[in-house]
Image: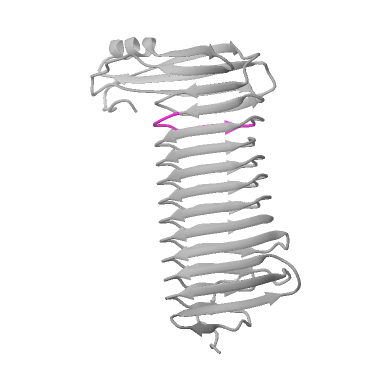
Amino acid sequence: MGGVVLAGQSVVTRRIEKRIPLAGYSKAAVIHRYGDVTVIGTGDAHAVVDALVRVTARDRRLAEEFAGKVEIQATGQGDSFVIATSYPPDVRDPQLGYEVHMSIRMPAGVAALVRNAFGDVRIVGMDGDCRVVNRYGEVEVDRCDRSVVENTYGRVRLAQTRGLAVVRNSYGDVDLRLAGGPVQVTNRYGTVHTEQSADDVTIDNQFGNVFARSDRGALSIANRYGDVNAWVDDAELAALSIMSRLGRVNLSLGEQVPFRIDATARQGRIVSGLPFEVRRVGTAQEVSARQGAGGPQIDIRGVWSDLVIHGDVSEPAPDSPTVER
Protein backbone atom coordinates (compact mmCIF):
# COMPACT_ATOMS: atom_id res chain seq x y z
CA MET A 1 0.00 0.00 0.00
CA GLY A 2 1.30 3.44 -0.86
CA GLY A 3 4.28 1.98 -2.76
CA VAL A 4 6.09 -1.16 -3.87
CA VAL A 5 7.90 -3.34 -1.32
CA LEU A 6 11.15 -4.76 -2.70
CA ALA A 7 13.49 -7.37 -1.25
CA GLY A 8 16.28 -5.94 0.89
CA GLN A 9 14.39 -2.83 1.97
CA SER A 10 14.31 -1.58 5.54
CA VAL A 11 11.08 -1.92 7.50
CA VAL A 12 10.21 0.46 10.34
CA THR A 13 7.18 0.32 12.64
CA ARG A 14 5.84 2.99 14.96
CA ARG A 15 2.91 2.80 17.37
CA ILE A 16 0.58 5.76 17.94
CA GLU A 17 -1.79 5.71 20.93
CA LYS A 18 -4.36 8.36 21.82
CA ARG A 19 -7.15 8.71 24.36
CA ILE A 20 -9.90 11.03 23.07
CA PRO A 21 -12.85 12.29 25.19
CA LEU A 22 -16.09 11.88 23.25
CA ALA A 23 -18.61 13.09 25.85
CA GLY A 24 -21.13 15.40 24.16
CA TYR A 25 -20.56 14.01 20.67
CA SER A 26 -23.25 11.89 19.00
CA LYS A 27 -21.24 11.01 15.87
CA ALA A 28 -17.71 9.80 15.26
CA ALA A 29 -16.08 9.67 11.83
CA VAL A 30 -12.90 7.75 11.03
CA ILE A 31 -11.14 8.94 7.87
CA HIS A 32 -8.40 6.59 6.77
CA ARG A 33 -6.70 5.52 3.54
CA TYR A 34 -4.02 2.83 3.64
CA GLY A 35 -4.52 -0.07 6.04
CA ASP A 36 -7.11 -1.90 8.09
CA VAL A 37 -9.57 -0.20 10.47
CA THR A 38 -11.32 -1.86 13.42
CA VAL A 39 -13.97 -0.08 15.52
CA ILE A 40 -15.22 -1.72 18.73
CA GLY A 41 -18.08 -0.36 20.83
CA THR A 42 -17.52 0.07 24.58
CA GLY A 43 -19.33 1.51 27.58
CA ASP A 44 -16.73 4.22 28.07
CA ALA A 45 -17.15 7.94 27.38
CA HIS A 46 -13.88 8.21 25.48
CA ALA A 47 -12.18 6.66 22.46
CA VAL A 48 -8.88 4.84 22.58
CA VAL A 49 -6.89 4.82 19.34
CA ASP A 50 -4.14 2.27 18.78
CA ALA A 51 -2.45 2.62 15.39
CA LEU A 52 0.53 0.70 14.03
CA VAL A 53 2.48 2.49 11.30
CA ARG A 54 4.58 0.29 9.00
CA VAL A 55 6.95 1.83 6.46
CA THR A 56 9.37 0.23 4.00
CA ALA A 57 12.08 2.23 2.24
CA ARG A 58 15.48 1.93 0.54
CA ASP A 59 17.24 2.63 3.83
CA ARG A 60 16.26 2.84 7.48
CA ARG A 61 16.73 6.60 7.76
CA LEU A 62 14.15 7.31 5.06
CA ALA A 63 11.70 4.84 6.61
CA GLU A 64 12.08 6.35 10.10
CA GLU A 65 11.70 9.88 8.74
CA PHE A 66 8.48 9.02 6.93
CA ALA A 67 7.03 7.02 9.86
CA GLY A 68 7.68 9.94 12.20
CA LYS A 69 5.55 12.24 10.04
CA VAL A 70 2.45 10.03 10.01
CA GLU A 71 -0.11 11.42 12.47
CA ILE A 72 -3.54 10.61 13.88
CA GLN A 73 -5.52 13.85 14.04
CA ALA A 74 -8.58 14.26 16.28
CA THR A 75 -10.91 17.26 16.05
CA GLY A 76 -14.50 18.08 17.00
CA GLN A 77 -16.89 19.58 14.47
CA GLY A 78 -20.35 20.39 15.84
CA ASP A 79 -21.94 17.19 17.13
CA SER A 80 -19.32 15.08 15.30
CA PHE A 81 -15.81 14.05 16.18
CA VAL A 82 -13.37 13.24 13.39
CA ILE A 83 -10.39 10.91 13.74
CA ALA A 84 -8.21 11.09 10.63
CA THR A 85 -4.89 9.66 9.50
CA SER A 86 -2.55 12.14 7.83
CA TYR A 87 0.45 11.23 5.72
CA PRO A 88 3.42 13.32 4.57
CA PRO A 89 2.64 15.13 1.28
CA ASP A 90 4.43 14.74 -2.03
CA VAL A 91 5.60 11.16 -1.71
CA ARG A 92 7.49 10.55 -4.97
CA ASP A 93 9.75 7.60 -4.13
CA PRO A 94 8.35 4.49 -5.93
CA GLN A 95 10.25 2.22 -3.52
CA LEU A 96 8.54 3.70 -0.46
CA GLY A 97 5.68 1.64 0.95
CA TYR A 98 3.49 2.44 3.95
CA GLU A 99 0.31 1.39 5.75
CA VAL A 100 -1.38 2.10 9.06
CA HIS A 101 -3.45 -0.53 10.86
CA MET A 102 -5.83 1.26 13.22
CA SER A 103 -7.93 -0.07 16.10
CA ILE A 104 -10.38 2.24 17.87
CA ARG A 105 -12.46 1.50 20.95
CA MET A 106 -15.23 4.09 21.23
CA PRO A 107 -18.57 4.63 23.03
CA ALA A 108 -21.12 2.20 21.61
CA GLY A 109 -23.89 4.81 21.56
CA VAL A 110 -22.38 7.14 18.95
CA ALA A 111 -23.10 6.85 15.24
CA ALA A 112 -19.95 5.56 13.54
CA LEU A 113 -18.75 6.40 10.03
CA VAL A 114 -15.63 4.78 8.58
CA ARG A 115 -14.24 5.92 5.24
CA ASN A 116 -11.29 3.91 3.96
CA ALA A 117 -9.43 2.77 0.85
CA PHE A 118 -6.96 -0.07 0.37
CA GLY A 119 -7.76 -1.99 3.54
CA ASP A 120 -10.32 -3.97 5.49
CA VAL A 121 -12.93 -2.41 7.79
CA ARG A 122 -14.53 -4.09 10.81
CA ILE A 123 -17.15 -2.56 13.14
CA VAL A 124 -18.36 -4.54 16.16
CA GLY A 125 -20.87 -3.91 18.94
CA MET A 126 -22.19 -0.41 18.17
CA ASP A 127 -25.66 0.61 19.39
CA GLY A 128 -25.89 3.57 17.02
CA ASP A 129 -25.90 3.75 13.24
CA CYS A 130 -22.92 2.30 11.38
CA ARG A 131 -21.82 3.40 7.92
CA VAL A 132 -18.83 2.21 5.93
CA VAL A 133 -17.53 3.57 2.63
CA ASN A 134 -14.63 1.44 1.45
CA ARG A 135 -12.64 0.28 -1.59
CA TYR A 136 -10.23 -2.59 -2.17
CA GLY A 137 -10.91 -4.45 1.04
CA GLU A 138 -13.35 -6.54 3.03
CA VAL A 139 -16.05 -5.07 5.29
CA GLU A 140 -17.48 -6.73 8.39
CA VAL A 141 -20.29 -5.23 10.49
CA ASP A 142 -21.28 -7.22 13.57
CA ARG A 143 -23.94 -6.36 16.17
CA CYS A 144 -24.75 -2.84 14.97
CA ASP A 145 -28.05 -1.02 14.71
CA ARG A 146 -28.88 0.62 11.36
CA SER A 147 -26.07 -0.26 8.94
CA VAL A 148 -25.12 1.11 5.53
CA VAL A 149 -22.17 -0.33 3.60
CA GLU A 150 -20.83 0.92 0.27
CA ASN A 151 -17.92 -1.18 -0.95
CA THR A 152 -16.04 -2.18 -4.10
CA TYR A 153 -13.54 -4.94 -4.74
CA GLY A 154 -14.10 -6.84 -1.53
CA ARG A 155 -16.37 -9.11 0.49
CA VAL A 156 -19.08 -7.71 2.78
CA ARG A 157 -20.30 -9.57 5.86
CA LEU A 158 -23.11 -8.37 8.16
CA ALA A 159 -24.25 -10.30 11.23
CA GLN A 160 -26.81 -9.65 14.00
CA THR A 161 -27.79 -6.20 12.78
CA ARG A 162 -30.89 -4.74 14.44
CA GLY A 163 -32.15 -1.91 12.24
CA LEU A 164 -32.28 -1.41 8.48
CA ALA A 165 -29.24 -2.91 6.73
CA VAL A 166 -28.31 -1.54 3.30
CA VAL A 167 -25.45 -2.97 1.23
CA ARG A 168 -24.23 -1.63 -2.09
CA ASN A 169 -21.31 -3.71 -3.29
CA SER A 170 -19.50 -4.71 -6.46
CA TYR A 171 -16.76 -7.21 -7.30
CA GLY A 172 -17.21 -9.14 -4.07
CA ASP A 173 -19.53 -11.49 -2.18
CA VAL A 174 -22.17 -10.37 0.34
CA ASP A 175 -22.99 -12.50 3.40
CA LEU A 176 -25.80 -11.53 5.81
CA ARG A 177 -26.86 -13.60 8.81
CA LEU A 178 -29.24 -13.10 11.72
CA ALA A 179 -30.44 -9.69 10.52
CA GLY A 180 -33.10 -8.34 12.88
CA GLY A 181 -34.30 -5.52 10.63
CA PRO A 182 -35.06 -5.08 6.92
CA VAL A 183 -32.25 -5.90 4.49
CA GLN A 184 -31.58 -4.30 1.10
CA VAL A 185 -28.71 -5.64 -1.01
CA THR A 186 -27.50 -4.41 -4.39
CA ASN A 187 -24.53 -6.38 -5.67
CA ARG A 188 -22.61 -6.87 -8.90
CA TYR A 189 -20.08 -9.57 -9.79
CA GLY A 190 -20.39 -11.59 -6.61
CA THR A 191 -22.46 -14.09 -4.64
CA VAL A 192 -25.16 -13.03 -2.16
CA HIS A 193 -25.93 -15.26 0.83
CA THR A 194 -28.59 -14.35 3.40
CA GLU A 195 -29.83 -16.58 6.20
CA GLN A 196 -32.09 -16.45 9.26
CA SER A 197 -33.43 -12.94 8.72
CA ALA A 198 -36.32 -11.73 10.87
CA ASP A 199 -37.65 -9.01 8.53
CA ASP A 200 -38.06 -8.25 4.83
CA VAL A 201 -35.10 -9.00 2.55
CA THR A 202 -34.65 -7.44 -0.91
CA ILE A 203 -31.80 -8.61 -3.15
CA ASP A 204 -30.82 -7.15 -6.54
CA ASN A 205 -27.86 -9.03 -7.99
CA GLN A 206 -26.02 -9.41 -11.29
CA PHE A 207 -23.30 -11.79 -12.47
CA GLY A 208 -23.36 -13.99 -9.39
CA ASN A 209 -25.41 -16.58 -7.55
CA VAL A 210 -27.91 -15.96 -4.73
CA PHE A 211 -28.44 -18.24 -1.72
CA ALA A 212 -31.39 -17.14 0.43
CA ARG A 213 -32.87 -18.76 3.50
CA SER A 214 -35.19 -16.26 5.11
CA ASP A 215 -37.16 -17.29 8.17
CA ARG A 216 -39.65 -14.43 8.38
CA GLY A 217 -40.80 -11.34 6.52
CA ALA A 218 -40.94 -11.09 2.73
CA LEU A 219 -38.08 -12.23 0.51
CA SER A 220 -37.67 -10.56 -2.89
CA ILE A 221 -34.88 -11.58 -5.28
CA ALA A 222 -34.00 -10.18 -8.71
CA ASN A 223 -31.00 -11.87 -10.30
CA ARG A 224 -29.43 -11.65 -13.73
CA TYR A 225 -26.72 -13.86 -15.17
CA GLY A 226 -26.55 -16.13 -12.13
CA ASP A 227 -28.47 -18.85 -10.29
CA VAL A 228 -30.96 -18.39 -7.45
CA ASN A 229 -31.12 -20.93 -4.61
CA ALA A 230 -33.99 -20.37 -2.17
CA TRP A 231 -35.37 -22.41 0.72
CA VAL A 232 -38.89 -22.22 2.18
CA ASP A 233 -38.79 -24.12 5.47
CA ASP A 234 -40.66 -21.78 7.82
CA ALA A 235 -44.39 -21.05 7.68
CA GLU A 236 -43.74 -17.55 9.04
CA LEU A 237 -42.14 -16.49 5.76
CA ALA A 238 -44.62 -13.88 4.49
CA ALA A 239 -43.88 -14.05 0.78
CA LEU A 240 -41.22 -15.09 -1.73
CA SER A 241 -40.74 -13.34 -5.06
CA ILE A 242 -38.03 -14.35 -7.54
CA MET A 243 -37.24 -12.75 -10.90
CA SER A 244 -34.50 -14.55 -12.82
CA ARG A 245 -32.96 -13.75 -16.18
CA LEU A 246 -30.42 -16.05 -17.82
CA GLY A 247 -29.93 -18.18 -14.74
CA ARG A 248 -31.35 -21.22 -12.96
CA VAL A 249 -33.77 -21.12 -10.02
CA ASN A 250 -33.54 -23.91 -7.43
CA LEU A 251 -36.46 -23.78 -4.98
CA SER A 252 -36.64 -26.12 -1.98
CA LEU A 253 -40.03 -26.44 -0.25
CA GLY A 254 -40.38 -27.88 3.25
CA GLU A 255 -42.74 -30.85 3.43
CA GLN A 256 -44.68 -29.49 6.41
CA VAL A 257 -44.80 -25.84 5.28
CA PRO A 258 -48.02 -24.60 3.62
CA PHE A 259 -47.63 -22.36 0.57
CA ARG A 260 -49.22 -21.06 -2.62
CA ILE A 261 -47.05 -20.97 -5.72
CA ASP A 262 -47.28 -19.41 -9.18
CA ALA A 263 -44.30 -19.89 -11.47
CA THR A 264 -43.64 -19.01 -15.11
CA ALA A 265 -40.59 -19.91 -17.20
CA ARG A 266 -40.37 -18.06 -20.51
CA GLN A 267 -37.91 -19.59 -22.95
CA GLY A 268 -37.10 -22.10 -20.22
CA ARG A 269 -38.60 -25.15 -18.52
CA ILE A 270 -39.99 -26.08 -15.12
CA VAL A 271 -38.63 -29.23 -13.50
CA SER A 272 -40.62 -30.47 -10.51
CA GLY A 273 -40.11 -33.31 -8.09
CA LEU A 274 -43.53 -32.56 -6.60
CA PRO A 275 -46.94 -33.54 -8.05
CA PHE A 276 -47.45 -30.19 -9.76
CA GLU A 277 -49.19 -29.74 -13.10
CA VAL A 278 -46.75 -28.15 -15.53
CA ARG A 279 -48.63 -26.34 -18.31
CA ARG A 280 -47.27 -25.11 -21.61
CA VAL A 281 -48.51 -21.68 -22.72
CA GLY A 282 -46.88 -20.67 -26.01
CA THR A 283 -43.11 -20.61 -25.41
CA ALA A 284 -43.59 -20.59 -21.64
CA GLN A 285 -44.22 -23.22 -18.97
CA GLU A 286 -46.37 -22.47 -15.93
CA VAL A 287 -47.21 -23.95 -12.52
CA SER A 288 -49.95 -22.97 -10.07
CA ALA A 289 -50.35 -25.01 -6.89
CA ARG A 290 -50.82 -24.91 -3.16
CA GLN A 291 -49.93 -27.02 -0.16
CA GLY A 292 -52.02 -26.89 2.99
CA ALA A 293 -53.73 -23.71 4.16
CA GLY A 294 -52.03 -20.35 4.56
CA GLY A 295 -48.27 -19.99 4.33
CA PRO A 296 -46.25 -17.74 2.04
CA GLN A 297 -47.22 -16.71 -1.46
CA ILE A 298 -44.44 -17.77 -3.85
CA ASP A 299 -44.11 -16.02 -7.21
CA ILE A 300 -41.34 -16.97 -9.64
CA ARG A 301 -40.71 -15.44 -13.04
CA GLY A 302 -37.90 -16.69 -15.25
CA VAL A 303 -36.72 -15.44 -18.64
CA TRP A 304 -34.33 -17.83 -20.37
CA SER A 305 -34.20 -19.57 -16.99
CA ASP A 306 -35.02 -23.10 -15.84
CA LEU A 307 -37.04 -23.43 -12.63
CA VAL A 308 -36.29 -26.48 -10.49
CA ILE A 309 -38.67 -27.23 -7.61
CA HIS A 310 -38.16 -29.99 -5.07
CA GLY A 311 -39.79 -30.92 -1.79
CA ASP A 312 -37.07 -31.99 0.62
CA VAL A 313 -35.01 -28.96 1.65
CA SER A 314 -31.90 -31.15 1.77
CA GLU A 315 -32.37 -33.16 -1.43
CA PRO A 316 -30.63 -32.30 -4.73
CA ALA A 317 -32.61 -30.81 -7.59
CA PRO A 318 -34.24 -33.38 -9.91
CA ASP A 319 -32.69 -33.95 -13.33
CA SER A 320 -35.81 -34.37 -15.45
CA PRO A 321 -39.21 -32.67 -15.65
CA THR A 322 -42.55 -34.24 -14.85
CA VAL A 323 -44.86 -35.15 -17.71
CA GLU A 324 -46.67 -32.07 -18.98
CA ARG A 325 -50.43 -32.06 -19.09
- Return the residue found at the far front: 282
Image point (62%, 79%), residue name: 274
Image point (58%, 78%), residue name: 287
Position of residue 301 in the picture relative to residue 262 (left or right): left
**What is the x, y in percent for residue 320?**
50, 82
Image point (45%, 70%), residue name: 305
Q: Is 117 contained in the magenta span?
A: yes
Judge whether 141 appears above or below 62 on screen. below
Image quarter of residue 315: bottom right
Picture mark count = 0
Check the picture and name the quadrant holding the N terminus: top left
**What is the x, y in percent for residue 251?**
57, 68
In this rendering, does residue 254 appear at all? yes
The colour style of the image is: one colour
Q: Is 300 contained in the magenta span?
A: no
Check the picture and name the quadrant holding the C terminus: bottom right
Q: Main secondary structure of the magenta part?
A: loop
Image point (45%, 44%), residue name: 169
Image quarter of residue 225: bottom left
**What is the x, y in percent for residue 67?**
37, 14
Judge whether 72 appears above or below 195 on screen. above
Image quarter of residue 90: top left
User: What's drawn in magenta, residue-wise?
Assistant: 116-125
Judge whether 70 appears above or below 199 on screen. above
In this rendering, does residue 213 appear at all? no
**What is the x, y in percent for residue 270?**
51, 77
- Front one among 78 and 122: 78
Position of residue 125 in the picture relative to residue 120 (left or right): right
Position of residue 13 in the picture relative to residue 19 (left or right): left
